[in-house]
Amino acid sequence: MSHSLRPQAPLSPKWLLVAGGVCVPVKWAHGWKSRYSSVRGRGRRGRVQTPVASGKKLACACRSTPSRLVPRLRPLRSACPAMAKLLKLMALGLALAFLGERFVTFRRRMNVSHQVLPVEPPSCHLIQGLDNGSEDIDILPSGLAFLSTGLKYPGMPSFAPDKPGEIFLMDLSEDRPRARALPIKNEFDVQSFNPHGISAFVDKDRGGAVFLYVVNHPRGMSTVEIFEFQGDALLHLKTITHELLSSVNDIVVLGQERFYATNDHYFTGHFLSQLELFLDLQWTNVVYYSPDEVKEVASGLGFANGIALSPDRKHVYVAAVTAHSIHVMERHDDWRLTPQKVLHVGTLVDNLSVDPATGDVWAGCHPNGMKLLAYDPADPPGSEVLRIRNILSPRPAVSTVYANNGSVLQGSTVAAVHGHKMLVGTVFHKALCCDLRAPGGPPRK
Ligand SMILES: [Ca+2]
Ligand SMILES: [Ca+2]
């Protein structure tokens, strides 16, 4: 690199250019003795024309440098390329060190070294007809279970990419419950239906009418669909969209058209959302929605996912997938949430459900997130279900109720219980129904 040392005019030595192309007042440079390389670029006062020096005090003029100073810079010309090269190497080294550190922590957050030790309740069977995922499950106190199936989620496999998603129903009060798809009535685009998190709601003010709120991703968007359950079908009532509901994963209904929703990414574009995951930005949140008010009520979460209410509705539980944790928050009358504590469970927590009878929290988890992201049928992702007793106490009890290396069930996302029956759903694989009673033993407590 060569530099023109021809004098420039008009002269105005008030501004100097230092490293990085930044111009500073000349008085700041008083006493500098380093042998700066000259830099050509754009400073605050316009294009840099010529490097200058004043004795051993060196800087570069932004424009209009005293010509009498220019020749004295000549001995420094050879230092410029070396310094620039050194700076480039330092920047490259720092960038590589940063990426390396992020990669190591990313693998740790994905739990790549986690070994799945098999745990199986006494009696489990795969549910017939559910072969393309059942990402979320919600069970009413009556035993009616709703299952959202056929999710197409960016970065995850799908065994039926061209088939629209569906809502299935099971009646767990039956001895041998079967799953059946619920047809959708009314004006609704079933072809683009891509159901994700769900939450069922019994409205006592409307004679016990049952409503199902479903997170939907038609054409990559995020909406919340409200259906009324009519026994043998779902009647579509409304589609809710809002700028704060930008990347919704799960919801929990609080009343008519009133719910909390988790956003699992800050960015909505594929590249930036993947970068956000890799860099572990922890910018995801919980949003409160009502017709009158929509606001963020919790933030700073690492991939917010499942959300559930305590039976007394005073606490909200939120899963943070990449932080391997469940956040316990207190709910206030104005719907604000304040953090109470964080329970670290050592695995990637997806959806949460609460047993209304006991208050226990059930979590569908991913033992190894990397196997989900880089799906290999020969080495599939496993499944894991945790049960958390006394989550509000100082010492909650966490136990593994189900664990499988993927030979039976891959990519578990949710576990929900009704009495002694447990349903386990997955992102894209099958679904499981288990009887939690020990053979010949007493009913589960
Ligand atoms: Ca849910
Ligand atoms: Ca989820």
Image (cartoon, rainbow, N blue to C red):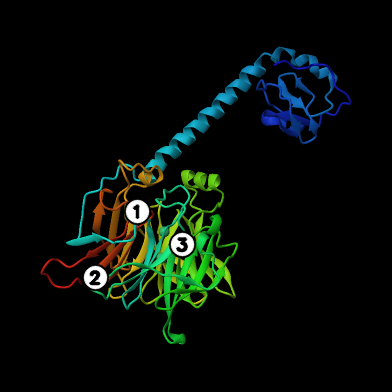
- Mark 1 sits on what residue? 429
Q: Quadrant of the N terminus?
A: top right
Amino acid residing under circle 3: Pro
Q: Position of residue 192 (x, y in %)?
A: 52, 59
Foreground of the two, 323 or 268: 268
Q: Residue at x 59, y 65 (%)?
A: 242
- Where residue 207 sits, quadrant-wise, is bottom left
Measure how far apart labels 3 and 1 are at the Cα level: 15 Å
Disc 3 residue lies near ligand 1 with CB under 8 A: no
Asked if the residues shown at circle 3 and circle 1 are in contact, with their CB atoms under 8 angstroms apart, the answer is: no
**SS at mark 2 in the image:** loop
Q: Please name the residue that numbered disc 2 is placed on.
A: 176
Q: Circle 3 is placed at which residue position?
A: 195
User: Callout 1, which amino acid?
Assistant: His
Residue 340 appears anywhere in the view: no
Tell me which label, 2 or 1, sits earlier in the chain: 2
Give the amino acid at mark 2: Arg
Q: Earlier in the sequence, mark 3 or mark 1?
A: 3
Tag shown at residue 230 = none
Residue 350, percent across and down?
Answer: 38, 57
Question: Which is nearer the eye, 59 or 258?
Answer: 258
Question: Residue 64, image x and y in percent?
Answer: 84, 27
Nearest the eye: 158 or 379: 158
